Amino acid sequence: EVNNNLIGKITEAGLKIAGLSTDNKLVEIIENPNHPWFIGVQFHPEFTSNPRLGHPLFSGFIKAAKEYQDKHNS
């Protein structure tokens, strides 16, 4: 999670608060809307993934990487 005293600095830097703890007291997900794929999480998506069904963060990252590759290799 993010130290609540730093939320102002985080948002001033252009990062987006994208997810909170279940009690809505702590920031657990941040995103950079100015980057094609930048996300920071305080949980472990790998614990809910398996080779056949990856967590949406992993699936989304692979999809974005493939789209980037297709765009830059054409």
Image: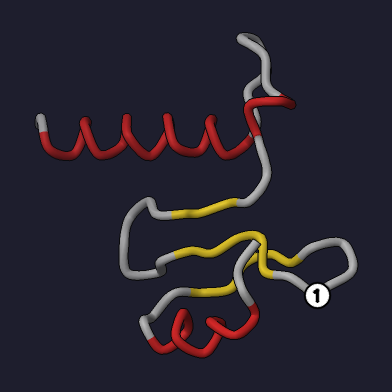
Identify the residue position indicated by label 1 in the image: 25
Q: Position of residue 62 (x, y in %)?
A: 42, 30
Q: What residue is at 52 percent from the left and 90 percent from the top?
A: 8
Is residue 15 found left or right of 1 in the rendered image? left
Name the quarter where the N terminus is drawn: bottom right
Is residue 21 found left or right of 14 in the rendered image? right
Instruction: Report which quarter residue 73 is drawn in.
Output: top left
Q: Is residue 54 above or below residue 21?
A: above
Q: Is residue 35 above or below residue 44?
A: below
Q: What residue is at 38 percent from the left and 39 percent from the top?
A: 64
Q: What residue is at 33 percent from the left and 55 percent from the top?
A: 36
Q: Position of residue 20 (x, y in %)?
A: 74, 67
Q: Secondary structure at mark 1?
A: loop
Q: Position of residue 65 (x, y in %)?
A: 32, 34
Q: Amino acid at mark 1?
A: Lys
Instruction: Report which quarter residue 34 is drawn in.
Output: bottom left
As rendered, which of 49 and 10 lies closer to the eye? 10
Q: Residues within 10 Å of mark 1 (few under 14, many from 20)?
A: few
Is residue 73 found left or right of 58 in the rendered image? left
Is residue 19 found left or right of 40 in the rendered image? right
Q: How is the model colour-coded?
A: secondary structure
Q: Is residue 7 above or below residue 43?
A: below
As rendered, which of 42 and 69 lies closer to the eye? 42
Q: Check the image and name the residue furthest to the top.
A: 51
